[in-house]
Structure formats: structure tokens, C-alpha cells
Image (cartoon, helix red, strand yellow):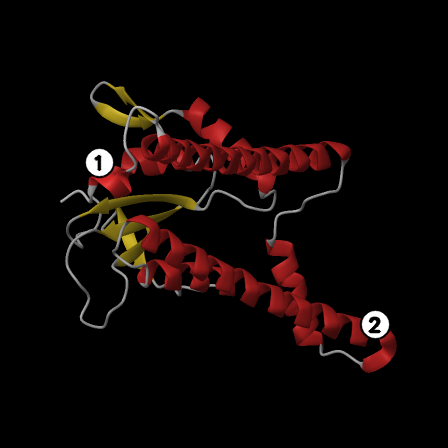
Amino acid sequence: MALRDDDDDAAIDHDDLRDVIELHKAVYASHEVLGWYTFSSTDAPPGDDAWAIQDEITAYNESPLLLHLQTQGADPAGRLLLHVYTAGTRDKKPTFISAPYTIVTDDAERLSVDFLANEPGRGGANALAAHLRSLAKSVSLMSERADALVAYLERAAGGGGADADTVRAIRSVCAALPVVRQSPLFDAAFLKELNDALLVNELATITQTCLSVQQLADKCRLAFDEGHEPRSKRGKFL
């Protein structure tokens, strides 16, 4: 969220914020602005300077939430150092009131967090190989679960009976996914990206082959050049 300075006070750049919201809703049409977030090194509630932003956010939500992230310290119970506040009044003065919350995640988010938590610290090819293996495992697991859901729905459609709670859960998961409609433009863009990736891979293979041929030619030139004796007659280099 871009900010501008008005008389030494932070204020929202509404034009930039509206553009961001429109771009987000183009993909997730059902999402809404719930509030804003800030962070500090302590768990102290936001001060009076946060009210300027809070008041401006009300243009997008009548009762916005404020998410406060504590960047230092550790919770004895191992919980995330997150605090959620709502706007209220105390002693006839506006104040931020702490609100309870529960963190809910889905399988895709848990897979991402598990990968980041277990990402190896090594660099180079080893880190890339570990990343690709983890990615392939995650995709394979999600594909198996998707196949299981499809098989369950097919049995239900064939008269096998279905549990209402399970069907509602499947519908909720499908509603959370971005909608991709088949269209010639989408197919053309997909094929273009696929062809670009295949072309880059082909060029890399050709380059590697040319390098191998060049190295072989240099060795042959060194070993059989008329102006030099074969290496076997000169002995080995030390």
C-alpha cells in the first residue's frame, strides 16, 4: 500500500490502492478489504499515529481490522506473534481493542509452510534439486487428493449416495480456486509460454553440445597436430 506525506503525516495514496484492489479482484472477485496491517518490535498496541490510516481505511470497510505483527521476541507457547485489533472507545477516547482470532489453513498452505520450514540451507545444484523434489512431491500429493475427490463425486452422481457435509466442503474448496475459463486467448498464451520454455531448453542443449564438440576438437588438435608430437611420446605432465 503506497503512502504519501501530507504535512508530515502519513496518508494513503488512494489512486494506487484502488488500482491494487481492482487487480486483485480481477482474480479473486469474492475478496474484500478487511483492514490493514502494521509491525513493530514490541507487543505494545498501535499509537495515536495509526488512527490516521485507520480513518482512511474506513472508505473501503466500515469497521476495518488492524493486524499487528511483532518482529522480535518469542511466544513461550510457540504461537505466532500476531495481534488483531478493532476500533473502539474507552473513557470516551478512541482506542484499539484486542480481538480474539483463530488461524485456519488449507492443505496447499500447509504444504508451502512445510517446504519453507524444511528448506535446506545449502546453495547451488543441491538446493535446486531439493526444491524440485519437494515441489514434485507436493504436486503429486495434491493430484492424488484431487483424483480421490473426483472419484467420490462420480460415485455420488451415479447413485452411490453422498454426505452433505463432504459435498459442501468440496464446493468450498472449489470456490476458493481461481476460475480459469477455456478460451482461445488463454490457450494461445499457454502454448506460447510452453513453446518459449521448450525453446530455451533446446537452446541450452544445443549450446552444451557445441561446447562438448569444441572441447573434443581442441583435444584432437592438441593430440594430432602435425607441428607437435603426440602426447604419448612426450610423457605425462606433472
Of residue 200 and residue 12, the one placed in the foreground of this image is 200
Q: Residue furthest top?
A: 7
Q: Is residue 179 above or below residue 100?
A: above
Q: Position of residue 42 (x, y in %)?
A: 15, 52
Element under disc 2? helix
Tell me the distance, in whole angstroms, between the alpha carbons under discs 2 and 1: 57 Å
Please report the residue visible at 52 percent of the width from the left and 44 percent of the height from the top. 32
Please report the residue visible at 27 percent of the width from the left and 39 percent of the height from the top. 231
Determine whether, in the image, residue 40 is placed left or right of residue 80. left
Q: Position of residue 43 (x, y in %)?
A: 18, 55
Of residue 209 and residue 198, the one placed in the foreground of this image is 209
Please report the residue visible at 17 percent of the width from the left and 42 percent of the height from the top. 237
Numbered mark located on residue 49 in the image: 1
Determine whether, in the image, residue 13 is placed left or right of residue 6. right
Numbered mark located on residue 157 in the image: 2
Q: Could you tell me the amino acid type at mark 1?
A: Asp
Q: Could you tell me the amino acid type at mark 2?
A: Ala
Mark 2 vs 1, N-terminal side: 1
Q: Is residue 197 above or below residue 7?
A: below
Q: Position of residue 221 (x, y in %)?
A: 36, 30
Can I make out residue 90 in this image?
no
Can I make out residue 161 in this image?
yes
Label 1 CA crowd tier, 10 Å (few <14, some 14–19, many 20+): few
Numbered mark located on residue 35 in the image: none
Determine whether, in the image, residue 194 is placed left or right of residue 2. right
